[in-house]
Every structure is written in structure tokens, then in C-alpha cells.
Image (spheres, rainbow, N blue to C red):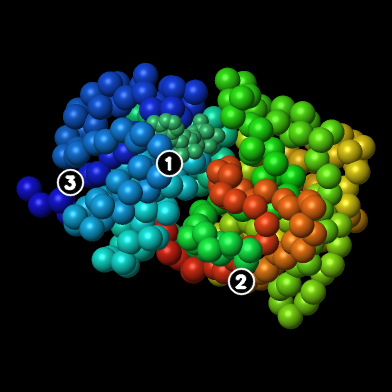
């Protein structure tokens, strides 16, 4: 059987605090019951995940199942975007969500129950969305792609801390945010987008495609992940009290209505961080990817996946 007829499955054994590994035998039973033809691999690291997908596409696989959380989807997207053999939107990805935050799947109501997720992959439809490409302004690091949300500043700082709280499930991000609050310092930033320059002290600059991040928070003014535009939120000079007072607003989407949050849409953005004494972290889809200034551009409808 040629590779294009088979599914290529990757499982991140550490996702969901190890739940992906424990559930795999049951998932495998269900896939066999539903007569899926497949090969499978466990990831040994994020980089291994990217390489597995990159090589699979080069070998002719065009149907992928990703078992894990947002980081596993992110690494899978990067494997697809970095290969040059096939148009990226011709590779279809099914997701069985077994992560901690599981934020990306919430936008599309992809079921967390593995049997229902398999049914979505088997009987659902194929949708597409835009992808973001991040290039680093202050280093030679390779470009990183994202499918959900990227951010510079406090949210990157939270991601750098969240690992040790993952056993709390989706609450890990909120706990990470509260614990990081007291050591984080707002940074100087110059944002360039839509021929405008915004110079400010900032808590964070968020570059969104989909609706949820940080374990269910809604930090951007989400409209449409296929409109060719990012949803930007710049949180300007928030105090610790501002954050504590507005914790509920982080989750119900109304944080973007605050005066100190500037929102707009754009298809490219530069986030320049000139102050070498306070260089912010950069996160993409909940993965810590670097530090300092970035330039981000949108690649319209580059990612194809199974939805209900
Ligand atoms: N075998 C492995 N050992 C350790 N880490 C791994 C391994 N395979 C992949 N990883 C890394 O595991 C990290 C977490 O994966 P993932 O995001 O899927 O799960 P999660 O953190 O539980 O879920 P979520 O991101 O939805 O909160 C990713 O950064 C990925 O690079």
C-alpha cells in the first residue's frame, strides 16, 4: 500500500501529563476497529516531532493524526510548513486532543473524547486556516510557524514557568500567570504594523489567529482564522493590580475592552525590543521559542485539518 493511502500517526507520550501514552492502547484498538491503515511513532522531543512529520511528508504521507496537546499540534504544523515537497494545505491533519490546555481545538469544537475525535477524522470535513510565520530580529534562529497564538512578554514568561504546574491541568496557565506576576517587569517595545508605529511600555504583545490560549483565556479580539489577518492585542503598561483585578476578564474575552489594551488587525507586524536589560520571552502556541524582537507575517489558508 502506498504511503498516500495510509495515516501517519504521532503520539507525544508526555502530553496531558502522560495521559497520551496511557490512552494509546485504547486509541489503537478504536483505530483498528474503524479499519484505519496507519504507521505510528512516539515523539522523543519537540524537534523529533518536527522531523518525523517533515520526513513523513517527504515520503508521500498526506494524512496525519496528531495525538497530544497544543505543543504537539504546533510541532506538527512546523514539520508541514518546513517541508517543500507538497503544498502545505494538501496535507490533512486530524487531532486527538490529549493535552493540558487543549486551546486550539476549542475554536473548532474538536471533541476531546478520543472515540468522537476519531469519528471526526473519519467522517468530518476538511477545513483550512491561516498560519503565522515568526522570524527573529536579533538572532539567526530559524523561522517558527504557529497555528493558534504567539506572544511577546508576560505570556512567554508564563510559558517558561508553566511546566511545573501541568499536573493542575488547564489551570496550570492561570497558576503560572499568578506566580509569575510578581517577578515580571513590563518591557519597552516598538510595534510596527499597518504603517503605524506604537512605542510603549508593555505587559505583552499578542498575535492571534484562533480564539483561546493559556488554558481557555481569550486575549485577542477573535473574528476569523481564515481572513488573512492577525488579531493583535497590545497590553500597555499593566500594573500587577490591573491583572489581579481583571482575572475574570482574561477568560470571558472582555479584557480587550480595557483602555490599556490596544487592538487591531494586520497581516504583518514587527515587535522591536531595544532595551537589552529587559529582553522579553517569545512563545508560540504555548511553546517557548526564543527571546527578543520578532517579525511576523501571515500565510493565508496554509493549514488543513479535520473538523466536525
Ligand atoms: N518524549 C518527549 N519527552 C519530553 N517532551 C516531549 C516529548 N515529545 C514531545 N515533547 C514536548 O512535550 C511538550 C508538551 O506537549 P503538548 O503541548 O502536546 O502537551 P501539554 O503541554 O500537556 O498540552 P497543552 O500544550 O495543550 O497544554 C512539547 O513542548 C513537546 O515539544
**Mark 1 vs 3, N-terminal side:** 3
In this orientation, does residue 277 appear? yes
| Distance CA(mark 2)–CA(mark 3) | 36 Å
Provide the secondary structure element on which disc 1 rests.
helix
Residue beneath the point at 36% across and 56% down: 80
Task: State left or right for residue 47 relative to residue 263.
Answer: left
Can you tell which of label 1 and label 3 is closer to the viewer?
1
Residue count near mark 3 (Cα–Cα under 10 Å), binned few <14, some 14–19, many ≥20:
some
Beta carbon of the mark 1 residue lies under 8 A of ligand 1: yes
The residue that label 3 is drawn on is 6
Residues at circles 1 and 2 in contact by the CB criterion of under 8 Å: no
Q: Nearer the viewer, residue 203 or 67?
A: 203
Q: Quadrant location of residue 232? A: bottom right
Residues at circles 2 and 3 in contact by the CB criterion of under 8 Å: no
**Mark 2 vs 3, N-terminal side:** 3
Residue beneath the point at 77% across and 63% down: 274
Q: Nearer the viewer, residue 97 or 30?
A: 97
Residue 286 in percent (x, y) is at 58, 42
The residue that label 2 is drawn on is 267
Provide the secondary structure element on which disc 2 rests.
loop
Task: State left or right for residue 56 relative to residue 283.
Answer: left
| Distance CA(mark 1)–CA(mark 3) | 23 Å
Residue count near mark 1 (Cα–Cα under 10 Å), binned few <14, some 14–19, many ≥20:
some
Task: State left or right for residue 214 relative to residue 261.
Answer: left
**Mark 1 vs 2, N-terminal side:** 1
Please give the label number shown on residue 64. Answer: none
The residue that label 1 is drawn on is 46
Provide the secondary structure element on which disc 3 rests.
loop
Q: Quadrant location of residue 221? A: bottom right
Amino acid at each position: 500500500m502506498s504511503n498516500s493511502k495510509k495515516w501517519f500517526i504521532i503520539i507525544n507520550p508526555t502530553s496531558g501529563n502522560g495521559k497520551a501514552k496511557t490512552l494509546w492502547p485504547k486509541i489503537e484498538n478504536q483505530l483498528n476497529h474503524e479499519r484505519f491503515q496507519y504507521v505510528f511513532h512516539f515523539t522523543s522531543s519537540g524537534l523529533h516531532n518536527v522531523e518525523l512529520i517533515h520526513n513523513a511528508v517527504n515520503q508521500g504521507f498526506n494524512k496525519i493524526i496528531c495525538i497530544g496537546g497544543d505543543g504537539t499540534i504546533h510541532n506538527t504544523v512546523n514539520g508541514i510548513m518546513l517541508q517543500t515537497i507538497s503544498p502545505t494545505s494538501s496535507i490533512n491533519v486530524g487531532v486527538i486532543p490529549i493535552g493540558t490546555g487543549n486551546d486550539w481545538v476549542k475554536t473548532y469544537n474538536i471533541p476531546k473524547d478520543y472515540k468522537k475525535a476519531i469519528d471526526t477524522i473519519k467522517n468530518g470535513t476538511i477545513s483550512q486556516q491561516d498560519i503565522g510565520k515568526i522570524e527573529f530580529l536579533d538572532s539567526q534562529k530559524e523561522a517558527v510557524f504557529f497555528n493558534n497564538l504567539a506572544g511577546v512578554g508576560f505570556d512567554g514568561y508564563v510559558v517558561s514557568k508553566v511546566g511545573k504546574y501541568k499536573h493542575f491541568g488547564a489551570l496550570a496557565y492561570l497558576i503560572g500567570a499568578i506566580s509569575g506576576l510578581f517577578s515580571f517587569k513590563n518591557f519597552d517595545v516598538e510595534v510596527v504594523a499597518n504603517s503605524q508605529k506604537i512605542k510603549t511600555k508593555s505587559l505583552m504583545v499578542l498575535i492571534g489567529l484562533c480564539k483561546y490560549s493559556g488554558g481557555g483565556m481569550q486575549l485577542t479580539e477573535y473574528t476569523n482564522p481564515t481572513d488573512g489577518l492577525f488579531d493583535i492585542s497590545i497590553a500597555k503598561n499593566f500594573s500587577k493590580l490591573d491583572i489581579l483585578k481583571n482575572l475574570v476578564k482574561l477568560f470571558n474575552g472582555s479584557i480587550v475592552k480595557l483602555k490599556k489594551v490596544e487592538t487591531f488587525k494586520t497581516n504583518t507586524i514587527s515587535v522591536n525590543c531595544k532595551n537589552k536589560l529587559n529582553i522579553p520571552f517569545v512563545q508560540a502556541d504555548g511553546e517557548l521559542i526564543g527571546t527578543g524582537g520578532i517579525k511576523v507575517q501571515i500565510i493565508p489558508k496554509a493549514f488543513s485539518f479535520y473538523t466536525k
